[in-house]
Image (tube, rainbow, N blue to C red):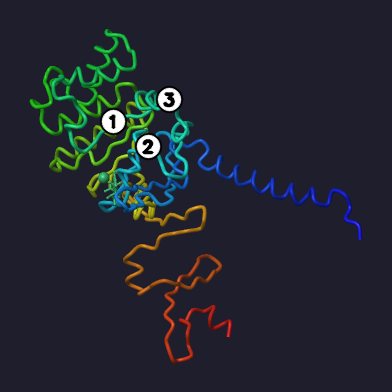
């Protein structure tokens, strides 16, 4: 039998097409989003031990959003923030902010990215402001580094301090400001070059609840008045309850998201509804909430059953000696 010439062509075309499709799936993932984290992995290795801080994290943030990020200590939040800030690079996976692939920036582009595209505020006020400069000088410094002229720097710095309610601190150094004033000045400084993305890693962690509320209000101002997309890491439930979207990180992956929206009750008052969703990644993985796993004593293997409008998940507990090695899931009964 002769194989007609060209038979192999469709096969190789097939493989080429699969490859192209995989590439398309990667490049079109999150198209149009301001922040795209595509299966981001960050492994810290040293002294013979390896820590997988991020384990294939997916996250999309649209321009204009204000998103809260929560998660236990050590879950990878700061690792992600450092990568988004351009201070660290992922071990694998891709991070794109405003169309830039952060893993592929030259040193010069990386510096420009940090100066103009992204602003950050850390938990320790001392890390945000230079101690020997006044509030006004602290806000003007990022503009000076970006080549903004002296006059514009001065006007802009005062305007920003006013927007965040700390104009009276203009001529004070951080040691003569309260913790809340320092953080609001830090937000003003982070926004000096009008970045599209503002990152805040537990900015209210060292503040009392009243002051924390003021600092969070400043982040809302950054979002609504200055148009910055904001990602804020917080442990404060009062803060996360005020945002529309809260992303939870567990073991280096996004695990759940809580979305909130307002609805009018019968009397016409706005009532806030919150719905928690598990994140389904593109490989089909979800993380079941720990409480549910414990409540149903699930371990190692679970049984899935596709129903017309949902998927059922059953704990699978093989029972030795009974001959009945299956839980009472409907599928197992039908299969017998
Ligand atoms: N520079 C580092 N070297 C080694 N391990 C690190 C480093 N930074 C963070 N880690 C580890 O990575 C994991 C995630 O840390 P981190 O991102 O700081 O978590 P979070 O901010 O959620 O508390 C932790 O296990 C932490 O110990
Ligand atoms: Mg942290």
Q: Is residue 166 left or right of residue 91?
A: left
Which residue is at a point 38% across and 46% down the rendered structure image? 42
Which residue is at a point 27% across and 53% down the rendered structure image? 72
The residue pinned by badge 1 equals 221
Quarter occupied by the C terminus: bottom right
Which residue is at a point 34% across and 24% down the rendered structure image? 115
The residue pinned by badge 2 equals 84
Mark 2 crowd level (few <14, some 14–19, many ≥20, 10 Å Cα): many
Q: Nearer the viewer, residue 191 or 97?
A: 97
Dot 3: element: helix
Mark 1 crowd level (few <14, some 14–19, many ≥20, 10 Å Cα): some
Residue 306: image location, x then y, percent: 54, 69
The residue pinned by badge 3 equals 109
Residue 186: image location, x then y, percent: 22, 28
Which residue is at a point 21% across and 35% down the rendered structure image? 215
Where in the image, quadrant-wise, is ligand 2 located? top left
Farthest residue to the right: give it.
Answer: 1
Q: Is residue 325 above or below residue 314?
A: below
Farthest residue to the left: give it.
Answer: 176
Q: Is residue 76 above or below residue 194?
A: below
Dot 1: element: helix
Quarter occupied by the N terminus: bottom right
Sequence-first tag of 3 and 2: 2
Q: What distance separates the C-alpha of mark 3 from that of mark 2?
A: 14 Å
Q: Is residue 296 above or below residue 98?
A: below
Name the front one of labels 3 and 2: 3
Residue 157: image location, x then y, percent: 24, 17
Farthest residue to the front: give it.
Answer: 48
Disc 3 residue: CB within 8 Å of ligand 1: no
Disc 2 residue: CB within 8 Å of ligand 1: no
């Amino acid at each position: 039998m002769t194989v007609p010439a060209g038979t192999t062509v469709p096969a190789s075309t097939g493989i080429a097409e699969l490859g192209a499709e995989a590439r398309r799936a990667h490049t079109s993932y999150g198209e149009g989003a301001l922040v795209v984290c595509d299966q981001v992995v960050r492994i810290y290795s040293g002294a013979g031990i390896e820590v997988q801080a991020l384990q294939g994290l997916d996250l999309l943030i649209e321009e204009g959003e204000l998103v809260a990020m929560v998660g236990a200590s050590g879950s990878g939040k700061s690792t992600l923030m450092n990568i988004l800030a351009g201070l660290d690079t992922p071990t694998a996976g891709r991070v794109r902010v405003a169309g830039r692939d952060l893993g592929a920036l030259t040193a010069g582009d990386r510096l420009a990215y940090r100066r103009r595209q992204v602003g950050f505020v850390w938990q320790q006020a001392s890390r945000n402001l230079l101690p020997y400069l006044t509030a006004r000088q602290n806000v003007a410094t990022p503009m000076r580094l970006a080549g903004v002229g002296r006059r514009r720097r001065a006007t802009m710095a005062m305007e920003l301090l006013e927007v965040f309610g700390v104009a009276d601190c203009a001529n004070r150094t951080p040691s003569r400001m309260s913790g809340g004033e320092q953080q609001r000045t830090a937000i003003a400084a982070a926004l000096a070059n009008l970045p599209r993305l503002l990152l805040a890693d537990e900015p209210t962690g060292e503040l009392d609840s009243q002051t924390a509320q003021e600092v969070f209000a400043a982040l809302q101002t950054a979002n609504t008045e200055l148009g910055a997309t904001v990602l804020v890491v917080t442990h404060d439930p009062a803060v996360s309850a005020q945002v529309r979207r809260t992303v939870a990180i567990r073991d280096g992956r996004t695990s759940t998201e809580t979305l909130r929206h307002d609805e009018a009750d019968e009397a016409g008052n706005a009532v806030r509804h919150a719905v928690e969703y598990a994140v389904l990644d593109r490989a089909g993985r979800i993380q079941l909430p720990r409480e549910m796993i414990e409540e149903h004593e699930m371990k190692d293997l679970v049984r899935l059953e596709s129903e017309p409008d949902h998927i059922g998940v059953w704990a699978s507990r093989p029972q030795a000696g009974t001959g009945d090695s299956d839980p009472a899931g409907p599928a197992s009964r039908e299969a017998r």
